[in-house]
Image: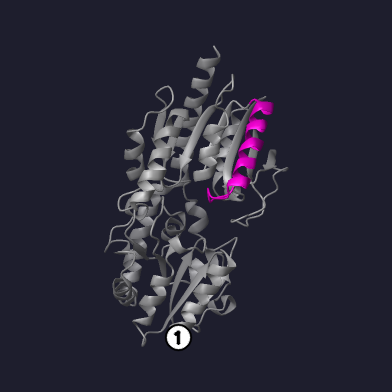
Amino acid sequence: MKRALIITTVSGFLQQFELTNVRLLQSMGYEIHYASNFEHPVYQKECDYEKLNITIYSIPIRKNPCHICDNLKAYRMLRQLVKEKHFQLIHCHTPMGGVFGRMVSIGLRDSPCIIYTAHGFHFYKGAPWKNWILYYTVERILAHRTDCMITINHEDYEYARHMRLHNRGLIACIPGVGIDLGYYGAPPSGISRKMLGIPENTLFILSVGELNYNKNHRVILRAMHLLPNQSIFYGICGCGSDQYMQELLLYAEKLGLNMQFRLFGYQQDVRPYLAAADVFAFPSYREGLGMAALEAMASGLPLITSDCRGTREYMISGYNGLVVPPDDAEGFAQAILIMTDIGVRREYGTNGKKMAQRFDKKYTEKRMKHIYQECERRINSVAN
């Protein structure tokens, strides 16, 4: 049987984002293997890998390249795995997973077809110069080991087009993993704000995603601090390091907002919170695309987002929400004030649902099927 290996840095990534690709590969006759760091999960969505016919390998890849010992061990383990299993295809994700996935087959006689999905290059317009020196250089070099490079936004696609891939490989742009419009358009019934611990008669602002500095949650708290007389409540669904969460709670307390702010933790089903919310906030410094914001749009919520590479794929300020520079607390405060008008929220929310149609998962699935078929043709041509 043909074998495909999926590599990610953090475990949980596969069930969160890649199950459609797993099903596509299985339908093409591939046996699926998954290598990731299962000791440091980020996404806590449960998954029965055995039931899905996926063989898993715990590899100590670390997100931070400075964890040299763990990453060297991970590289040796992955290389041995690739030697033993003779994979026909490797699909790698996330920066360090992408690095290892493209290096492990160097020097092997039977080199697999390498697909790399860039979920947002670390170099981009406005990125620090050190990002360009390090990450851009690495991507240019590793492009020579890449048979197919997939991006999820057009800015990254333009950069990828100027890289030289192995055997003039395929470069593609897809609309992320796609949205299940039926799922997010049908919130569960019978759940009230009171049940979720959200005060009634407030403007409820919601964010969803991993808790880290890049997500820039503090700017929403600063904006709320500039609006002391407004009835506003801010909640976040997601998890992160204990240190960051504690810092966020202490910051809210320092601003006198501890009664207007809550961390709801990781939620396998965020639809009740989306249904209860009035506005979705997405103030990140950097995004490849931003599936959480797209899912909120599909749910009919108006958005307040930062102006960054990912949000430019779907945000039109004054149409489906409002766009603000990421460090502009006053701008976010003004956006929140505008969103207190229920008529504005309804208009933006309706327009957002229309915009979300462009990101239906059926388009991603169709595109990925074509990509896998093209890669298989390349595999067969080499074999013959």
Q: Quadrant of residue 319?
A: bottom left
Task: Please give the residue where the numbered disc 1 appears in the rendered image.
Answer: 256
Q: Is residue 78 magenta?
A: yes
Q: Quadrant of the C terminus?
A: top right
Location of the N terminus (image quadrant): top right
Query: In the rendering, at what x and y percent does residue 181 appear?
Result: 47, 53
Single out the residue that lies furthest toward the right.
Answer: 50
Q: Position of residue 68 (x, y in %)?
A: 58, 46
Q: Position of residue 111 (x, y in %)?
A: 56, 23
The location of residue 265, given as percent across then percent down, is: 58, 68
Crowd tier of the residue under label 1, counting other residues whose Cα lies within 10 Å: few below 14, some 14–19, many 20 or above: some
Q: Residue at x 45, y 86 (%)?
A: 256
The image quarter containing residue 101 is: top right
Residue numbers of the magenta segment? 62-86
Q: Is residue 228 above or below residue 305?
A: below
Relative horizontal placement of residue 299, taking residue 71 as reference (left or right): left
Amino acid on which disc 1 is placed: Gly
Picture colour scheme: one colour
Farthest residue, direction left: 318
Residue at position x 64%, y 46% from top? 60
Q: Secondary structure at mark 1?
A: loop
- Tell me which secondary structure the magenta stretch mostly adopts: helix
Vertical arrangement, residue 349 with respect to residue 124, above or below = below
Q: Nearer the viewer, residue 23 or 219?
A: 219
Taking 265 as reference, is 132 above or below it? above
Residue situated in front as seen by the camera: 271 or 235? 235
